[in-house]
Image (cartoon, rainbow, N blue to C red):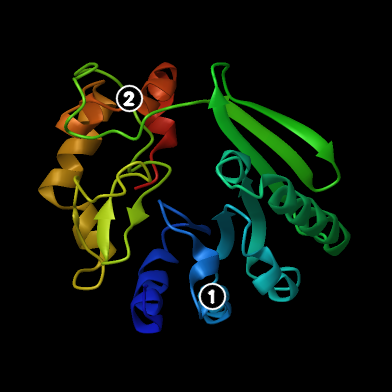
Amino acid sequence: MITANQFQRAVDQLAPWAPRLYLHVKGEPLLHPRLDDLLDRAHDAGLGVELVTNGTLLARWQEILLVHPALRRIHLSLQSLETLEAEAEALGAVLAFADRAQQAGLPVEFRSWKGTSKRQGTMLGPGRSLLTDAAFRWPTLDDPPISTSGFCLGLRDQIAVLVDGTVVPCCLDGEGVLALGNLYRQDLSEILAGPRAQALHRGFSDGRCVEPLCQRCQFRQRFDKRRGGAEGAEKC
């Protein structure tokens, strides 16, 4: 569990760089006993929060979530619910929350990433949408290489910060393989200016995957066609 002080350090560092903070990367934010305090701190830092959850603990937090000014959207993972024995009961609770969120003006996105088709967003009604996408494997160094060429939005549209403060280029690196530095001990500007971050960024600008993990990432292939707009997409 991230501590309040660690989270404060993180949001203070991240706020000048990005308007949105996503609570995810292999974690379940609704498990945190001080989630309301974390949302308060993000709001005070000027960060809008998007929360990614399997939805099973919504009842515990829904009265706070429905009114908290930091929240911009809640993403609900449908494929996570399918693994539960009480799937129908859990889905019913999620749909009931979505109804209340709609009344409160809080956007909800249902996610189902298990098919073979390309990403598609569908509006289900005011403030309610469905995002479907093809299934993918979380990359590991044990996977065979796919390609040494390609493009990614890591270090352009996003970075990720793990619970121990490790900064990685994207949310696919939940194990910290591509550790660029530690946000609890370094400033983010120093981390992004570091040799590993700069080499990775330049590599993608040139259409090269310089890191072995990136060479094995299936999800990265979805961005290859966007390489032509790399310069315009740069944010870090």
> x, y percentage for residue 134?
52, 23
> x, y percentage for residue 47?
54, 66
Q: Quadrant of residue 7?
A: bottom left
Q: Can residue 47 be seen in this view?
A: no
Amino acid type for the residue under numbered disc 1? Leu
The circle on residue 151 is: 2
Q: Which residue is drawn at 78% across and 59% down?
A: 97
Say if 59 sits above or below 56 in the image: below
Q: How many marks?
A: 2
Q: Nearer the viewer, mark 1 or mark 2?
A: 1
Amino acid type for the residue under numbered disc 2? Phe
- The residue wearing badge 1 is 35
| Front position in the image: 147 or 1 | 1
Say if 36 sits above or below 26 in the image: below
Dot 2 crowding, Cα within 10 Å, few <14, some 14–19, many 20+: many
Say if 9 sits above or below 172 in the image: below
Q: Quadrant of residue 126?
A: top right
Dot 1 crowding, Cα within 10 Å, few <14, some 14–19, many 20+: some
> x, y percentage for residue 68?
69, 73
Sequence-earlier tag: 1 or 2:
1
> x, y percentage for residue 208?
21, 22
| Front position in the image: 60 or 209 | 60
The circle on residue 145 is: none
Indicate left or right for 71 with 215 as reference.
right
Measured Cα–Cα span from mark 1 to mark 2: 35 Å
